[in-house]
Amino acid sequence: MSRTDAGAVDYTWRDSVLTATPLRALNAVGARLARHGWDRPPLTVDAVVAGAVKSAGSDDLGSTSYREPLELFLASCRDEAELTTFGRILITKMLSSALANRIELHRWSTDHPGAAAERITSPWVIVGLPRTGTSLLSNLLGLDPENRNLLQWEAAHLIPPASLEQATSDPRIAATAKELDGLFKLNPPLRVMHPFGATLAQECVSLFMYDVRTLALETQAHVPAYARWLEQADMAPAYAQHTSALQALQSAQPTGRWVLKTPNHLWDLDALLAAYPDARIVWTHRDPGPVVTSLASLANAGQRPLTSRTDPRPAAEEWKRKCGFAIGSATAFDERSGPGWCRHLHYEDLLADPVGAVRGLYAAFDEEVGDLHARRMRAFLEQRPQNAFGRHVYDPADFGWTYAGLAEEFAAYTERYGIATAAR
């Protein structure tokens, strides 16, 4: 961490280090016990499910589709992630919470069968890689009175779905804000590396957590074996959870059109369109050099407090490989699908004229941006804080890379889609 002349705080992945003395002591004790073959928590399916059942008050998860990915992820954590005792505790808690949400969603949907009739019509779905303007675009689209973002507090505490009356005063909003404050105290750099806020838009990848088929897990732990399984996995069960969650939310608050976003969709566009055949897909593009480098920094920042590994290169290389896989998968889909299945939007064009970029997307679907929507977007752009919590600083040399080398590695992608790569 450093300060600029203007007083802003610069954060890098190195600043995501566990400093709390009690937690460091916990890890030291856990490491000694592990050397004698006593790893705790055990990172087993039974332990995770038991935690979910206790929290949700039911053992009905609806189906067993979650079980294979959960077994594989936990095995990968044990074999590859080098988790500390604190890391094992947090991973176990995170998984139990996700499955508790699944249990609660299944129970609520069973008690409210009418929700299944809710249609998720023509959602906007932003599928670009991280760091390509997806958060900005999601926020801008969500300012249309006809549109609705999935909010972070809703994704964290889905059931019961909040009514219109509860939408701005639900106590779960404050609870989520408190949870995020705890995260920032544990890991301050995350606040500047990713937009967090209880009432901010959330990546819909969080809904895939209910089936344990999600890239979100790989931001918490270095799990290459699970990653390769996920790249070939059937994503239909994850999209089923995704749809059920949106239907539940929509049943309580009538919704015109959802605004959804996660790069996870790039991995399996066939599954996305099987779930939402009339989706309005936007693929955002940016020079892969800063994209991959920033993402490598973010991945290491997310994993560092949970692992004993200090070398940032394994996680960085894995996420670079993942970006290449996502681009290759989406490009292959593009080649066999022909034009029209998505709208391409370049990062530079979005930043140069955000309102104009949104107008262009609406025009592509024979619609116009309303006056209220346009005024809201302009107000948002004027009011949003710039570097309010600091700046995320990253350098490819930290991971053994150069921008020139990354440009060469991703040349086929940048040439196909006309993406400029800056000389660095």
Image (spheres, grey):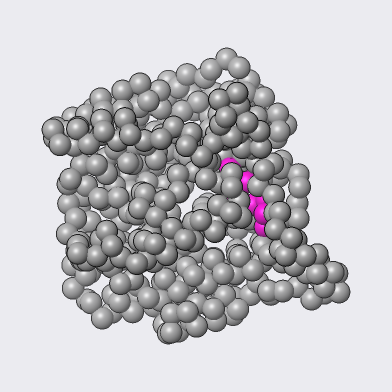
* Figure label count: 0
Q: Percent position (x, y) of residue 138?
A: 33, 41
Tell me which residue sits at (27%, 40%) in the image.
141
**Magenta stretch?**
298-306
Residue 40 seen in this snapshot: yes
Of residues 343 and 333, the one drawn nearer to the viewer in this rendering: 343
> Is 11 contained in the magenta span?
no
Tell me which residue sits at (26%, 81%) in the image.
111
Residue 318 seen in this snapshot: no
Q: Quadrant of residue 107?
A: bottom left
Query: Is 300 placed left or right of 308 in the picture?
Result: left
Q: Quadrant of residue 423?
A: top right
Query: Is 188 placed left or right of 287 in the picture?
Result: right
Q: Residue furthest top?
A: 423
Quadrant where the image shows the N terminus? top right
Q: Percent position (x, y) of residue 236?
A: 39, 61
Tell me which residue sits at (47%, 79%) in the image.
55
Q: Percent position (x, y) of residue 245?
A: 32, 64
| Main SS of residues in magenta | helix
Quadrant where the image shows the C terminus? top right
Tell me which residue sits at (22%, 69%) in the image.
116
From the viewer's perspective, is residue 119 above or below residue 135? below
Q: Percent position (x, y) of residue 221?
A: 63, 55
Q: Quadrant of residue 337?
A: top left
Query: Is 101 placed left or right of 30 in the picture?
Result: left
From the viewer's perspective, is residue 263 above or below residue 346? below
